Amino acid sequence: MCIDYFIKVYVSWSDDMSKDKVFIEKLKSTSEYCELAVSDKNSINELSVCKEHKAYIFKKELFGLEKSKIITMKHPLNINVIPHSHDYIEIQYVISGSITQIIDGERVVLNKGNMMLFNKNVVHSIEKAQENDLMYFIFINESLLDTRFFNTISKENPISKFLFQSLRGDSLSSNYMIIEELNSDIIQLLNSIYLESRIKAFDYENLLIAYVIALFIKMGRQEKIVGLKGLHNVSRKKRQILEIDNYLRDNFKCASLNEAAAALSIHPNYMCRVIKDITGQTFGELLTNIRMEVAETLLTSTNLSVENIAWEIGYANSAYFYKLFKRKKNMTPTQYRKATRKEIV
């Protein structure tokens, strides 16, 4: 068996049942599936995982996603999908029946009409789907989620927050988000994404991007979000650093150690210890890094002068802002703006 066959069949999956039979003939057991998976180290990397089992990292190249922004795929029947994580964003949508997964050792069942959004780092496996079980995947290349994307979606949108944490590779972020009782707008968008990715009509890639942005906005409005899962094992300090980080991102312009500590009911000295223990940074370094992230966004997406940007993120002295920015990016704010805008064009 070779990984090329896996790619060919798994990616070009259709409703043709003859392919289903061929696929099952080729992959009769989970162990055989594992042998196949590790046969090409370029597409799948072995990943050591706690709980005394191994998982694999599915890379974009496995599905041709490094050349595309968005790919859709039907989940195959009668196949146990090995424990894995991936370096792309994954959405699952159950159209009929139910799908059972093991996510970091926790059994999770998705029923008809449920939708799940995965953190790209979470380890999960999928149990065999039966004849009446139908689920579709939407794989999203993280390069789609750039500065312009996060400028399009409100930072108050829970989907935006979830995606941002995932892209940062934040080990403190939740593993997944489940949305139940999807409204008609979301269902229509999901169907449009699937059909457009299959038909591939003129300019379909741009239309797919527009659909996905609309999907995330609509998802953020959905009333029944079961919630962010996977944080139950996070230590008290890690929960506190999430609160600190969120506070600083909402108040980066005028934030100070004493004000942040008072707002979060934490002693300033203890807050400094928490930040240092979890991030390795001081309070000032964490705040500066957040301000620099905001500066990058403003330089890329607005025509504000560098002096005004410095003021907007909390620096009355623009020369000091220049110095900090150049230290972080190895170029001045003006050089960064020119370089990023060339890339956009």
Image (spheres, rainbow, N blue to C red):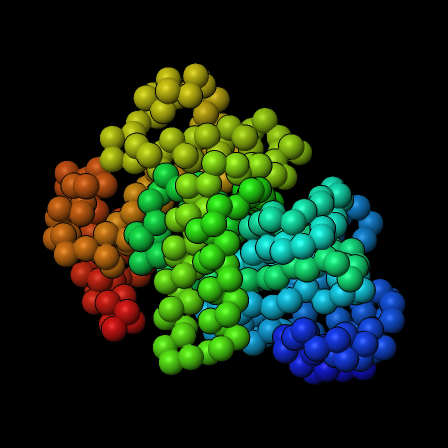
Q: Residue at x 41, y 73 (%)?
A: 205
Residue 199 seen anywhere in this rendered image of the structure: yes
Judge left or right: residue 133 versus residue 115. right
The location of residue 128, given as percent across then percent down, is 79, 59
Q: Where 149 sits versus 344, above or below? A: above
Q: Quadrant of the N terminus?
A: bottom right
Image coordinates for residue 248, horizontal then vertical, percent = 36, 34
Asked where in the image residue 96 lies, by quadrant, the reply is bottom right
Q: Is residue 82 visible?
A: no
Residue at image location 81% in from the left, 69% down from the top: 33
Residue at (30% x, 36% y) in the render: 252
Closer to the camera in the image, 143 or 321? 143
Residue 125, image x, y percentages: 73, 55
Residue occupying the point 57% across, 37% down: 226
- Asked if residue 313 is positioned above or below residue 266 in the image, the reply reads below
Against 149, residue 317 (above or below) is above
Residue 317 x/y as whole percent: 14, 41
119 vs 14, nearest the viewer: 14
> Which quadrant, please, contains the C terminus?
bottom left
* Viewer-proximal residue among 132 and 341: 132
| Residue 60 falls in image quadrant | bottom right
Q: Number of callouts in the render?
A: 0
User: Foreground residue, 276 or 162?
Assistant: 162
Q: Is residue 307 left or right of residue 193?
A: left
As drawn, is 194 to the left or to the right of 299? right
